[in-house]
Amino acid sequence: MADEPFTIRTLDRHCNNGVCHCDWRLSIQDCEESLSMWSSSSGLSLLFNRIYVKGHMLWNSSGNQHSGWLRPKPIEVRLLSSVILVADVLSTNWVARSYLYEIPWDFGLAGITIYLIGIAQTISQASRQSISGWLPPPLIVDIIGSTAVIFPFITSLAFPITAGALAESNLPLAEVFVRLTYIAWSFWTSVIGAAVFFTGTRLVRILQAYHKQSRSNRNYAAVQAGIYKIYLMIGLSSICLWGILWQYLGGITSLGLIISVFVNPTTRNKNAALKSKSSTGTNNEGTFGTGATSTVPDQHYDGGFEGSTIHAMTVTIQNDNEAILNAIERNNNKNRSSSWIILDDGKQSRKSKKFRSYFNINRIPVRRASDESSQMELTMTYNDDR
């Protein structure tokens, strides 16, 4: 098809003077983009390593009641789409190819959005005062977050599936829906990318403000490494969503995000910024490579969460959220020592710690412990000896 000296215009390819360029979402056969098949060799090598060397399974046949039998990951769905393109399976079924291409990217976008919402809501529950200047109320965060998770699935699936259904009967209208698909993705990636960049930079400022006040702490280097990790995730997520590195965008940024998730600096000392407190009042010790504590419950049953994307992201989100909460708690406690105290006559003045302790001013009630065996303590209290 590529050597025919005339113009061909179909939904999957445009040919001009014998040179064909494919819509790489739908086909890569007999076109200039066929060189991408070289990447299949590296993909097969990675697949062999995951399945036969590390023992990863797409489907769990153990029948354990604690885990389902279908355990695919978005990257594996993306691999399935790539295999279909390379093997030229369903070569004329544009509806199926459009669906298989879009669905893994929807899951990836939803994962970034949920990670962002989780951090925002954790900070919101920990300290309303510290977020009043840069985050909306929790209800608004819920509404915006739910919209950002649900609507991309609707728009990114409805438009390409409609385009695939109209490919043979009404090509001009099908191309209109293809353009609408790109417009919808441009909108969502721009909005979510801006939100990740904005909230991420503000979050780093909060953490840095705390660490500047505790440079003498022996755990300063380890906590600073955690800040660099957050920097890396923010930058790569924004680059990936905004499409700055177009040519090799998916591979480079996805690899960087994976590295940022699994990199944990090792240190002998306990990380003071990664502490949790159980409902019983005892510290829970976890092992995430840094000696930091965690509230993620251990999964000891067979076929559980170990090794899955859910477990990896749970550990990552839990570590980041605990670092945020403890940094904010320490920062707020220090700031409150010099805060303004509102007296009964409406005047503001600075009083000593003895005065505040005597009149029991600005004390925050301790949240009642829940029935869970281990969870983060989100409320902050003053020490009685202040």
Image (tube, rainbow, N blue to C red):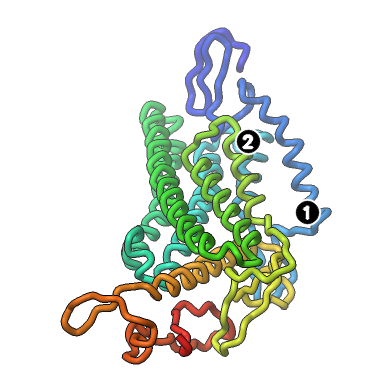
Can the viewer see residue 288?
A: yes
Determine which quarter of the picture holds residue 341: bottom left
Residue in the foreground of this view, choosing between 55 and 197: 197
Which residue in the structure is indicated by mark 2? 85
Residue 51: image tag? 1
Can the viewer see residue 162?
A: no
**Taking 3 as reference, is 37 above or below it?**
below
* First reached walking from the N terminus: tag 2 or tag 1: 1
Q: Is mark 1 on a helix, strand or loop?
A: helix
- Image coordinates of residue 251 in percent, x first then y, are 63, 39
Q: Is mark 2 on a helix, strand or loop?
A: helix
Determine which quarter of the picture holds residue 217: bottom right
Q: Which residue is drawn at 50% across and 60% down?
A: 207
**Taking 168 as reference, is 184 above or below it?**
below
Residue in the foreground of this view, choosing between 378 and 58: 378
In the picture, the quarter occupied by the N terminus is top right
- Image coordinates of residue 291 in percent, x first then y, are 70, 70
Work out which residue is located at the far bottom of the displayed protein and give it: 358
Tag 2 and tag 1, C-beta contact below 8 Å: no
Which amino acid type is marked by label 2?
Answer: Leu
Camera-nearest label, 2 or 1: 1
Residue in the foreground of this view, choosing between 300 and 159: 300
Which amino acid type is marked by label 1?
Answer: Ile
